[in-house]
Image (cartoon, rainbow, N blue to C red):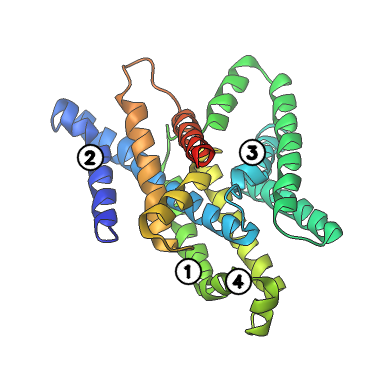
Amino acid sequence: MAKILPLIVLVLAGYSAAVPYFEGGDSHVNHWLFWELWLPRTLVAIGAGAALGLSGAIFQSLTKNPLGSPDIIGINAGASVGAIAVSLIWVNSLPIAAGAMMGALIVLLLILLTLRITGTFGMQMIVAGIAINAFALALVQFALTGVRQEDAYQISIWLSGSLAQLTWQVVIAIGSAIPIFGLALWALKRSLIVMRLGDHTAQVLGVCVSKVTLMSLIFATLLATFAVVSAGPITFLALVAPHITYKLFKQPLLLLPTAMVGSILLLSADLLARALPKGSSLPVGVVTSALGGIYLLVLLLKAWKR
């Protein structure tokens, strides 16, 4: 299966990028569509899916909870608040990416402060993240009520998770983030696997648990933030990708396969969104939410039957 995954990514990416040629032949218009619209969209889908998959795997490993993911814990919502605040309040003063990073890091800081007070790490992080997520979403809704209808419409599409109207600058941004933070997480992989045995065992084996935890959280948060900046707060993908990877390989914390599964999921959701009849296409985040909800429902039904 490990040899098939890269082939699936290449096939999906090639088909997704070549859609305009299939639809109308090789013309100047289709040439422009390919290089300026479809190819950036496909590459961002691959990058954002990989970033969300990696981020979800790290959060689930650290929390030792299958519900640990940046969208449920509140990282995506914090990045959304930061991006909206910069675009509406500090117009032309700060880049949107900087605002999203500040929002995500503030949420992470709040979660870490909560954990410092409780002294535990696991379900408490999930609960604290859900509470912060709800507060951040309330701020987003409040911001939407104070802008013009046209601006609120554009922001709502972005908040749904959209791969439309992407540029090569976005491709470069997400393409630069994945190697940097992905390699950083790869360097911490051995320590993260040892920490799955328990903090005390990890400390006996020479792992600095607090340092590895903090660095992993920061790198995973930055990966999720770059994905949010690139394609909006796409939900459920970071939650589902590690689950599917574990079912395929039966091994925890496989970073490269998880990144590939995340890319495949987002590419597939984008192709499904494009396949809808013209005039009824949905933002890709709506598709991932629907498919992720169905997947979780199936898991719950299987668990209930057992």
Q: Which residue bears the numbered disc 3?
A: 80
Earlier sequence position, callout 1 versus callout 2: 2
In terms of image quadrants, where is residue 150? top right
Left or right relative to 283: residue 87: right
On screen, 136 above or below 193?
above
Amino acid type, label 1? Leu
Report how far apart the C-alphas of labels 4 and 3 lie in the structure. Answer: 34 Å
On screen, 283 above or below 237?
above
Q: Which residue bears the numbered disc 4?
A: 197
Report how far apart the C-alphas of labels 2 and 4 lie in the structure. Answer: 42 Å
Q: State if disc 3 and disc 2 touch (CB < 8 Å).
A: no
Q: Residue at x 60, y 56 (%)?
A: 59
Q: State if disc 3 and disc 4 touch (CB < 8 Å).
A: no
Q: Nearer the viewer, mark 4 or mark 3?
A: 4
Q: Is residue 38 visible?
A: yes
Q: Secondary structure at mark 4?
A: loop
On screen, 300 above or below 203?
above
Earlier sequence position, callout 3 versus callout 1: 3
User: Residue most toward the left?
Assistant: 25
| Labelled disc at residue 183 | 1
| Labelled disc at residue 15 | 2
